[in-house]
Image (cartoon, grey):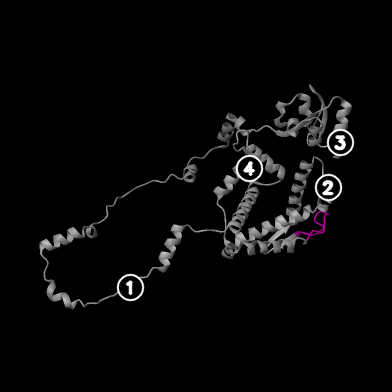
């Protein structure tokens, strides 16, 4: 089937369009309203679950909110067809994934690892992979490492198949000539069978010189390959560990000797917004909580970029005592403050 796609790109994309159009209206009733629908659409053996659709819809809604600088409601998003766009993208992905599985198309762990290391959200200032940011992002998204790897693998499979459909495949001139020569090569053979009896009277007894000459001409046939006897020992970690028991006291001692390596201080990503007085800070916090004001809008009003308000990933020791108590306290998740700082009353988000 993949070969047919490559031979006729127009047919392939036409079929993809028909699938997307046919499935575009399935299962939307109740998806965002909390109904009992569990599957939005099905493409072959691939089901698009409600949770998958809602997650993709919310992600796109969040992107648009950041672009507009204001919250966009679900009703407003659906009125401009955002739900249909997201559904068509999911159907296209499910179509590609199903075809990739049917054709046995896969990607190696090396490709998945390379794709993971390229993700900008997991890179530090030097462009290297930051494992702490990676684990923090997965925790916020409610994903395990294996679930995220599976998503990357699925995306890579879809991209591989989509590229093959769009661009097709070509064979180099040298390879094409070799294939044609092999399939088109023909040989003519004539045989003549002579009975052994015809040579018996003429062979005679070979002399020592004849035998030596024959040995010299076919010396390789009479040589035995050189061999060696080898003894070796296998040091298997599990076998060695079985003979070296480690007590609990030794484990505790090793832990206490290097305790700093096993303790990671709590960290949080924090934005700090300063206000001229307490009343303005209270009003700003209320506006942030009810959604009538965003950090993006506050930054724009002050002629700043949103990142100018960000403290980044901080630990408790990076903040003053008063800041630390609200940011890392029992209520330190969400919007907290105001707190007195050197720059005036501040709200932390």
Look at mark 1 in the image and give the residue it sits on. Answer: 188
Taking the image as shown, residue 44 lies to the left or right of residue 231, namely right
Q: Which label's residue is closer to the chain start, 2 or 3?
A: 2
Does 33 lie within the magenta span? yes
Q: Quadrant of the C terminus?
A: top right
> Which of label 1 and label 3 is nearer to you?
1
Q: How packed is label 3: few (under 14 Cα within 10 Å), some, or many (20 or more)?
A: few
Q: Give me the C-alpha separation between circle 4 and circle 3.
A: 34 Å
- Residue name at image x 76 percent, y 28 percent: 324
In the figure, residue 328 lies in which quadrant? top right
Q: Which label's residue is closer to the chain start, 1 or 3?
A: 1
In the figure, residue 157 lies in which quadrant? bottom right
Count of marks placed on residues: 4
Discs 4, 3 touching: Cβ within 8 Å = no
- Residue name at image x 75 percent, y 48 percent: 60
Q: Quadrant of the N terminus?
A: bottom right
Kind of element beneath mark 2: loop
Discs 4, 1 touching: Cβ within 8 Å = no
Dot label at residue 73? 2
Q: Give me the C-alpha separation between circle 1 and circle 3.
A: 92 Å
Dot label at residue 119? 4
Q: Nearer the viewer, residue 252 or 74?
A: 74
């Amino acid at each position: 089937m993949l070969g047919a796609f490559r031979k006729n790109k127009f047919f392939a994309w036409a079929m993809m369009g028909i699938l997307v159009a046919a499935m575009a209206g399935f299962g939307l009733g109740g998806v965002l309203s909390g109904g009992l629908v569990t599957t939005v659409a099905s493409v072959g053996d691939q089901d698009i679950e409600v949770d998958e659709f809602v997650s993709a819809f919310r992600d796109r809604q969040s992107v648009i909110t950041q672009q507009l600088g204001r919250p966009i409601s679900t009703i407003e998003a659906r009125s401009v067809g955002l739900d249909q766009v997201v559904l068509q993208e999911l159907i296209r992905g499910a179509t590609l994934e199903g075809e990739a599985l049917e054709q046995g198309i896969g990607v190696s762990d090396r490709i998945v690892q390379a794709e993971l290391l390229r993700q900008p959200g997991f890179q530090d200032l030097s462009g290297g992979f930051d494992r702490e940011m990676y684990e923090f992002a997965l925790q916020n998204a409610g994903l395990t490492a294996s679930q995220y790897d599976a998503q990357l693998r699925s995306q890579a499979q879809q991209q591989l198949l989509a590229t093959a459909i769009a661009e097709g495949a070509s064979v180099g001139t040298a390879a094409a000539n070799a294939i044609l020569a092999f399939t088109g090569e023909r040989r003519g053979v004539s045989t003549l069978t002579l009975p052994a009896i015809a040579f018996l009277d003429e062979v005679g007894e070979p002399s020592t010189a004849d035998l030596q000459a024959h040995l010299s001409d076919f010396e390789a046939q009479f040589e035995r390959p050189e061999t060696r006897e080898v003894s070796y020992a296998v040091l298997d970690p599990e076998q060695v560990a079985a003979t070296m028991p480690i007590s609990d006291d030794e484990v505790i001692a090793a832990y206490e000797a290097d305790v700093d390596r096993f303790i990671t201080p709590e960290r949080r990503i924090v934005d700090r917004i300063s206000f001229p007085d307490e009343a303005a800070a209270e009003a700003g916090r209320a506006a942030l909580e009810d959604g009538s004001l965003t950090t993006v809008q506050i930054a724009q009003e002050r002629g700043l970029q949103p990142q100018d308000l960000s403290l980044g990933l901080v630990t408790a020791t990076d903040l003053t005592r008063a800041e630390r108590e609200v940011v890392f306290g029992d209520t330190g998740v969400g919007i907290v403050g105001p707190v007195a700082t050197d720059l005036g009353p501040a709200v932390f988000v």
